[in-house]
Amino acid sequence: MDSHSPTSAAPPAAAETARYTYSPRLRWQPEVEEYFNTAYGRDHFARISEALAHPSCYSCIRVNTLKSSTDAVMHKLLDLVCKNELSAVINGLEVVELNGGDQSQEGCSLVHKCPYAGLENVLFVQGSGPHVLHYGSQPDQAVKEVVVSRKCAESVLRGAQVYVPGVLACSSHVEKGDKVAVSVAIEQPVKEDGWAVGITRGTVLQGLQSDAHYEERKGLYIGQGTAAMSRSAIFRVPHGIAVEMTERVYKLPSFNDVLEGEIFLQNLPSVVTARVLDPQSGERILDMCAAPGGKTTAIAILMRDEGEVVALDRSHNKVMDILKLASEMDLSCIKAYKLDALKSVRKTDEARSLGMADNHSEAIETPTEDPCHATVGGRSTSVDEDSSTTTVVFSDNKNLNSKRYISKAELRKNLRQMKNGPGRNNCSGGRVEKSKGFCPNSFDRVLLDAPCSALGLRPRLFAGEETLESLKKHSKYQRKMFDQAVKLVRPGGVIVYSTARVFLFCIAGVL
């Protein structure tokens, strides 16, 4: 009898059937897993881990009540479906009218209002899953595959498409329009007590057992779809949809570009957090860790866009995301700043001199067409061509000789910004405003949604990055932020502290 190489032998059909399934096992650092086993009991924590690896079977939609109403949004969703004879799919979601129509259809998803008091602006969209899928249409041909990163797979499980940056590997000879199976490569333990994916982006899959992560990807197939571009294009272009998902293990909506500005997909606890804060019109509210802006916009809507919502994040791009979302929802009361929440409180000496700083503005407000001239604090300045600085004279009644120096580079940089004009969503040149902090007792209410391990967010396909030491550091970091929040809220004001970490303790209750 001839012997065959293990790298080329075709696996038995039964083994192939077991391979193309979704049965993930969440991996933890051993000491973290043992800690939770002791805290909850092994069986209980095993149920928690299993639940975390699967998405919730419903999506939560928050309605922008300043632009629409809950009933109007429901009717608009149904109208979108009616245009295709009540059988259309909005990004993988079938919507069925509650009053009328056949509701006995297996697999249909329903849209209904949140039954909880105070959450009348919330809609629940029921999904379905897990579904058993049949991969490959030709039994004598190998299944063409695409391997995606863990974060990409978690998004796909929540209803997203497969985008170019998330693709790690692809079968050879994949062309636009080909049917491909989508699996996920999850971090594996490596030497030196670490974790790594171990796949070089652009790797070619041959459909053999020697393929990258062949055994590790068993039971980690999340669906199949149609290639939106060829293999060569996937690894050549920087962005775009690589695979349009047609069959999913979990059918959940993404609502990409659907009713933009009128709805926002948000976890129910986040919606509840804004309600608990109970912001009132005309108040000054601080959202200390605001990105991506879901809670910030929820607060602004509850205030009827009257007052001021200050949103902070230390990342430039995340501040841009907040401003973009506020613009989409037509909210004008939101002011977003780039600032580390640990530095939210202005130092005492700076706070005392704040009035003086207002009289002596250091911002270049209106540069002229000549890069060597500008108006600073309402006063004319000039730059000598052979000098690296310019003398700025302030016509201050208290100190007529007051001066400061501004570099030519700073003047020209500001001029370039003005020439470029306002960028998308009126964010000038893609720039964000920075802040030096705020005076104590300057906010009516403060929301602190502190950074955490996010171990309670679903779906989660890997948890090995967290150690007991890193979990302890989260709590120290959060305490420092809470100290800042206490200083910033006025006497008699309100602080709401929330973190996704606490939801880990509640996961078992939804099984």
Image (cartoon, rainbow, N blue to C red):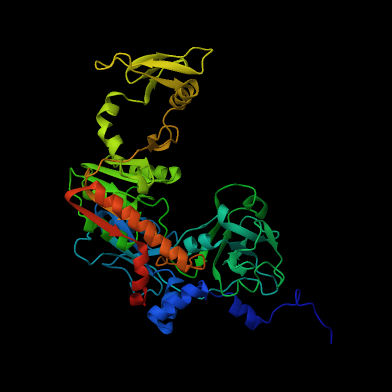
In the drawing, does residue 86 fall left or right of residue 386?
Answer: left
Q: Residue furthest bottom?
A: 1
Number of numbered discs visible in the structure rendering: 0
* Residue situated furthest right in the rendering: 1
Image quarter (top left, top right, bottom left or bottom right) of the N terminus: bottom right
- Percent x, y of residue 369: 45, 16
Q: Residue 349 location in percent, x, y?
A: 29, 36
390 vs 163, left or right, is left
Please provide percent x and percent y for residue 387: 51, 15
At horizontal 25% and vertical 52% (from top left) the residue drawn is 486
Q: On the image, which quarter does residue 360 sit in?
A: top left
Q: Residue 205 appears at what percent x and percent y?
A: 69, 64
- Work out whether residue 91 can be spotted: yes
- The correct choice, above or below, for 73 with respect to 250 in the image is above
In the picture, the quarter occupied by the C terminus is bottom left
Q: In the rendered image, is residue 88 in sight?
A: no
Q: Given the current orientation, which residue lies at the most extreme left position? A: 492
Left or right: where does residue 452 sit relative to residue 300? right
The quadrant holding residue 430 is top left
309 is higher (above) or lower (below) than 479: above
> 7 or 86: nearer the eye?
7
| Residue plotted at (38% across, 52% down) | 258
